[in-house]
Amino acid sequence: MNIKLKFTNLEPTASLEAYADAKFRMLEKMLIHLDPEGTADLHVELARTTKHHHKGDIYEVKANLHIPGKTFQVSETEEELYAGVDMAKDTLYRALEKFKDFKTDRSR
């Protein structure tokens, strides 16, 4: 799986890149069943939404996962950037799990 990180309106740090990469690498276990060739592409955008908030920043994490025959899009907004990464990963994992169950359940 290829992971590409994009930062918008915030500075990329090594710790943030490592954290996001480690969290989204956990999806590879699920992708083994859906994409055995390993051609999946994941584009993650970490962004500060605006600079005009009076009580802190609001961050948005967008993830687009492309596997052969299907594209998954997830967007999460949080006050903490690391929490947004966690929520985006969890939402994407649930979507992959639901899609895997749909593909394997052919008794309809």
Image (tube, rainbow, N blue to C red):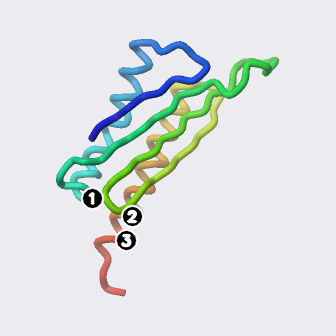
Q: Quadrant of residue 98?
A: bottom left
List the residue tagged with mark 1.
34
Q: Secondary structure at mark 1?
A: helix
List the residue tagged with mark 3.
102
Find residue 59 and report its horizontal and vertical position in percent.
62, 28
Q: CA distance from mark 3 to mark 1?
A: 11 Å
Q: CA distance from mark 3 to mark 2?
A: 5 Å
- Residue closer to the observer: 73 or 84: 73
Q: Residues within 10 Å of mark 1 (few under 14, many from 20)?
A: many
Q: Amino acid at mark 1?
A: Leu
Q: Quadrant of residue 25?
A: top left
Assess whether mark 2 and mark 3 are in contact (beta carbons under 8 angstroms). Answer: yes
Q: Residues within 10 Å of mark 2 (few under 14, many from 20)?
A: some
Q: Secondary structure at mark 3?
A: helix
Q: Quadrant of residue 17?
A: top left
Q: Residues within 10 Å of mark 3 (few under 14, many from 20)?
A: few
Assess whether mark 2 and mark 1 are in contact (beta carbons under 8 angstroms). Answer: yes
List the residue tagged with mark 2.
99
Residue shown at 45%/48% (left/top)?
92
Q: Please tell me how many numbered marks the rendered image carries.
A: 3
Q: Amino acid at mark 2?
A: Phe
Q: CA distance from mark 1 to mark 2?
A: 9 Å
Q: Which label's residue is closer to the chain start, 1 or 2?
A: 1
Find residue 18 and report its horizontal and vertical position in percent.
36, 21
